[in-house]
Image (cartoon, rainbow, N blue to C red):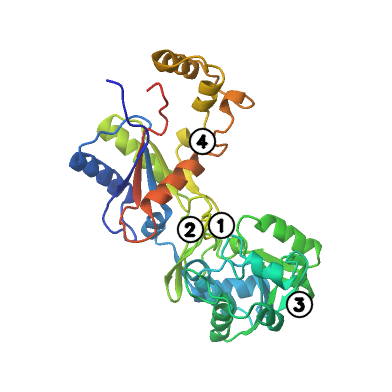
Amino acid sequence: MERKVGTISRGIRCPIIREGDDLAAIVVDSVLDAASSEGFELRDRDVISVTESVVARAQGNYASIDAIAEDVKAKLGGETIGVIFPILSRNRFSICLKGIARGAKKIILMLSYPSDEVGNALVSLDQVDEAGINPYSDVLDLKRYRELFGENKHPFTGVDYVDYYCELIREQGAEAEVIFANNPREIVKHTKNVLTCDIHSRMRTKRILKEAGAERVCGMDDILTAPVNGSGCNEKYGLLGSNKSTEDTIKLFPRECSDLVYEIQKQILDRTGKHVEVMVYGDGAFKDPVGKIWELADPVVAVANTEGLEGTPNEIKLKYLADNDFKDLSGAALKDAISQRIREKKSDLVGDMASQGTTPRKLTDLIGSLCDLTSGSGDKGTPIILVQGYFDNYTN
């Protein structure tokens, strides 16, 4: 019988993960237990995804603010440090800022405006327009910012991040000064030692800073790239992708976990005979049209994945075929014609008009975003996501 359901995304519950747990075995057992409980079967090319959070927990990849402070001091001198372009987040940045401030005597905090890199707004674009300010060229000190915009609390968290970040810095014994600018060169007028905290534009920012005369330049991806006094670390991303664990510790992005995804794949094959794909995912990549927040605060969507998830979709747009090539057909004839075209499609549809409008993104970014939406970030308790039918098409 013809299958009437396409892609299905299921949140899979599992035990609370602790450091040292055999995560591969837990994931496999949890998926197979769910299949038995809910009455579904695994199929070839199903995708099992595991959130990065539980991978890092199993690895024990944590660090204290003291470890951050020591590394910051060693790499940036421990005196006056420019901290530029942080995102506005209690979960993502506040604990990191504590450690950074503990490793310095003075922090010059340079905030981008009207919003941070991922869309959290300090002020609205309308407020900027009304004030006659050009955010691409105008530099504001705190006094001028308050005169123009007053107190601005984040609409979702209720936090005035300017006051909040300055207070965190002072609590660690450092002096705090804040400016508002979008040109990274501005910070070099205040200090030659700079920590740039942007995520996806960090390589360009580092280049601009060095060209502008900064002497010591680090990104968040340069801090805790190796253990400090036995701390966790991330060799590739440093502090990027970290989250608050306690008031003085962070959970870092997971370290190398390719072995994990292939071990899960192998165990599923051994126990079911099915060849599934596996990935470890972080934040999804999508923008909220109301809050304007771009979700992706991690350095990547996919931390690790099996080989079958490489590449981009190679799909034909059904409505294009229906409206153009087969506009004179209907019913069974239309279905048969479209099905035949799908079976005959080329292995690479780049430049083919029949593929226009299909999503030109990496498979791991698309599937990871689906998984992030399914698992959520709160109390659902489903850090494992099973995606079925993703690689199906109209002919299946």
Toward which corner of the image does residue 33 lie, by quadrant?
A: top left
Residue drawn at (55%, 58%) of the image = 292
User: Helix, strand or loop at disc 1?
Assistant: loop
Label 2 CA crowd tier, 10 Å (few <14, some 14–19, many 20+): many
Residue drawn at (75%, 65%) of the image = 183
Q: Identify the amino acid type marked 2.
A: Phe
Dot 4 or dot 1: first in sequence order is: 1
Residue drawn at (75%, 76%) of the image = 191
Residue drawn at (35%, 53%) of the image = 383
Toward which corner of the image does residue 146 lie, by quadrant?
A: bottom right
Dot 2 or dot 4: first in sequence order is: 2
Label 1 CA crowd tier, 10 Å (few <14, some 14–19, many 20+): many
Which x, y percent locates residue 119? 58, 61
Q: Which mark is residue 190?
A: 3
Q: Identify the amino acid type marked 3.
A: His
- Could you tell me which quadrant the N terminus lies in? top left
Give the residue at mark 1: 237
Q: Which mark is residue 310?
A: 4
Q: CA distance from mark 4 to mark 1?
A: 21 Å
Dot 2 or dot 3: first in sequence order is: 3
Asked if the residue at tag 1 contacts the one at tag 2, i.e. Cβ–Cβ closer than 8 Å, the answer is yes
Horizontally, residue 303 falls left or right of residue 144, namely left
Horizontally, residue 43 falls left or right of residue 251, namely left
Q: Identify the amino acid type marked 1.
A: Tyr
Q: Which mark is residue 253?
A: 2
